[in-house]
């Protein structure tokens, strides 16, 4: 008889500052702001599958506030388009997960299916930088 084990998700978390002028929602894929940031660790919503992906926001983050960004482990990510378990993922123009293709930045691998837009799925993160291959 199988015994169910409790799930342990051990995230790697960094503090990040939102200076975008709008709230960034939890589960959004983010990148580091490289355009004259006020603070180290300043973030913006990922806006393309070629962005250097930093991680996933763990809580809604108001503009002018600090939030938590998960950069490793299993993250809860907003879905942009349907994806299957085991699919490699990247970001769309709104910081949501979409299926990865060669030459794009890699967010990670889907552990649960992304069944429809704006729901959440579990993703094993590849780490900051979104390895491009």
Image (tube, helix red, strand yellow):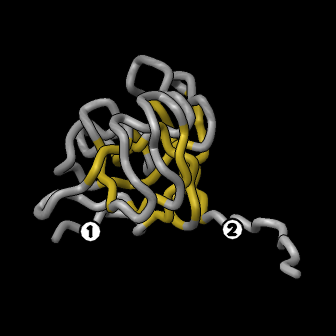
Between residue 125 and residue 7, name the one nearer to us.
7
The residue under the point 41% across, 41% down is: 43
Location of residue 21 with respect to 78 vertically, above or below = above
Which secondary structure, mark 2? loop
For this view, does 92 lie left or right of residue 110? Answer: left
Q: Earlier in the sequence, mark 1 or mark 2?
A: 2
Count of labels shown? 2
Percent position of residue 96, x then y: 38, 37
Q: Which quadrant: the N terminus?
A: bottom right
Between residue 36 and residue 117, name the one nearer to us.
117
Q: Which residue reaches farthest left?
A: 103
Disc 1: which residue = 131
Percent position of residue 39, x then y: 44, 43
Between residue 88 and residue 21, name the one nearer to us.
88
Percent position of residue 94, x then y: 32, 30
Between residue 50 and residue 4, name the one nearer to us.
4
Disc 2: which residue = 10
Q: Which mark is residue 66?
A: none
The image quarter containing residue 85 is bottom left
The residue under the point 41% across, 43% down is: 29
Number of other residues with Cα within 10 Å of mark 1, as a class: few under 14, some 14 to 19, many 20 or more = some
The residue under the point 40% across, 53% down is: 84
Number of other residues with Cα within 10 Å of mark 2, as a class: few under 14, some 14 to 19, many 20 or more = few
Q: Which quadrant: the C terminus?
A: bottom left
The residue under the point 47% across, 32% down is: 18
For this view, does 103 lie left or right of residue 42? Answer: left
Q: Which residue reaches farthest front?
A: 1
Alpha carbon of mark 1 to alpha carbon of mark 2: how far?
A: 21 Å
């Amino acid at each position: 008889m199988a015994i169910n084990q409790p799930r342990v998700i051990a995230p790697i978390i960094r503090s990040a500052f939102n200076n975008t002028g709008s709230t960034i929602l939890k589960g959004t894929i983010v990148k580091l702001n490289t355009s004259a940031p006020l603070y180290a660790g300043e973030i913006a919503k990922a806006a393309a599958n070629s962005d250097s992906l930093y991680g996933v926001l763990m809580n809604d983050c108001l503009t002018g506030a600090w939030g938590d960004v998960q950069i490793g482990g299993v993250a809860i990510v907003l879905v942009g388009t349907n994806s299957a378990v085991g699919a490699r993922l990247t970001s769309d123009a709104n910081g949501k997960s979409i299926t990865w293709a060669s030459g794009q930045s890699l967010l990670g691998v889907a552990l649960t299916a992304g069944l429809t837009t704006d729901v959440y799925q579990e993703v094993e993160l590849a780490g900051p930088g979104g390895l491009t291959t």
